[in-house]
Amino acid sequence: MKKSIMQNALGKQWDELPEALINHYGSNEQGENYAQGKLDIDYPWFMQLPYTIMRFIGALVNRRGQNLKTTVSKTMKGNKQYWHRVITFPDGKKIIFNSVFVADKDGFIEYINAFLGLKMTAFVEDNKLRYESRGYVLKLGKIKIPIPEWLALGHASIIESEYKQGDGQTFSMDFRIKHFLLGEVFCYKGIFVTKTSNINPVR
């Protein structure tokens, strides 16, 4: 049974997660997991052009919306976890947001392409899973150049919790990026259901 990046990052705290998040971050024998739900996306008007430009390098999403059908699949391949997100808008247009998670000391790095990544730490607090960013990184071959948060979009934080107690499959997530000068520059949040029919999570 393959352990996910999150299982390794949390260590002993993995067992403190509610069942819904165990199922979301666990994986089957092939290292796969799948979830679907509805997502709200919002950001200030002055970030429209930056996000449109950033889409060319695979970063975030450059369109707002509410109750957007979203699917998330995760696959472990070796020591990397590949995330594939598909967001469908009311007009039928789909935005795909891919990233790769790799282990890093004190946490992990989420790469949006071969060069740019976000360093994250995860921990369990008050029965919730929390992510906090630790800066950005520019990867040039084997060299990783740190980029302070204030030079980029800002500080990222994620809170995930069990949404329907006892359900074991439904969870909520809230992702925000705040810049010390510009304030909150990005937010997406939603409710998701993990498809656990073929998932046997490792505890």
Image (spheres, grey):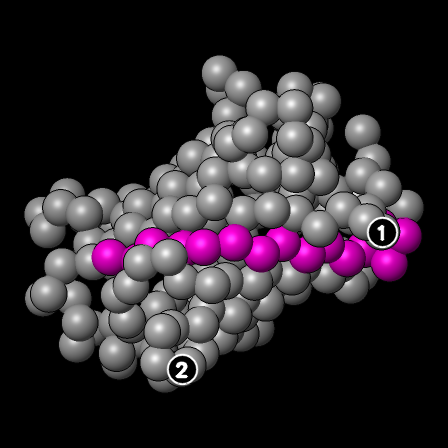
Label 1 element class: loop
* Quarter of the picture holding the C terminus: top right
Which one is nearer the viewer's eye here, 140 or 43? 43
Residue 48 is tagged as none
Residue 32 appears left or right of 34? right
Amino acid residing under circle 2: Lys
Q: Is residue 31 magenta?
A: yes
Residue 8: percent from left, percent from top? 71, 38
- Residue at label 2? 93
Residue 183: percent from left, percent from top? 13, 46
Residue 73: percent from left, percent from top? 65, 61
Amino acid residing under circle 1: Asn
Which one is nearer the viewer's eye here, 136 or 92? 92
The structure residue drawn at horizontal position 54% and vertical position 47%, both measured from the top left corner, is 192
Q: Could one spot residue 151 in this view of the protein?
A: no
Crowding near the residue tagged with mark 1, few <14, some 14–19, many ≥20 C-alpha atoms within 10 Å: few
The structure residue drawn at horizontal position 68% and vertical position 32%, both measured from the top left corner, is 168
- Reply above or below: 73 against 57: above
Magenta region: which residues?
A: 28-42
3D distance between C-alphas at marks 2 and 1: 30 Å
Q: Quarter-wise, where is residue 136 in the image?
A: bottom left
- Reply above or below: 63 against 135: below
Residue 92 appears left or right of 105? left
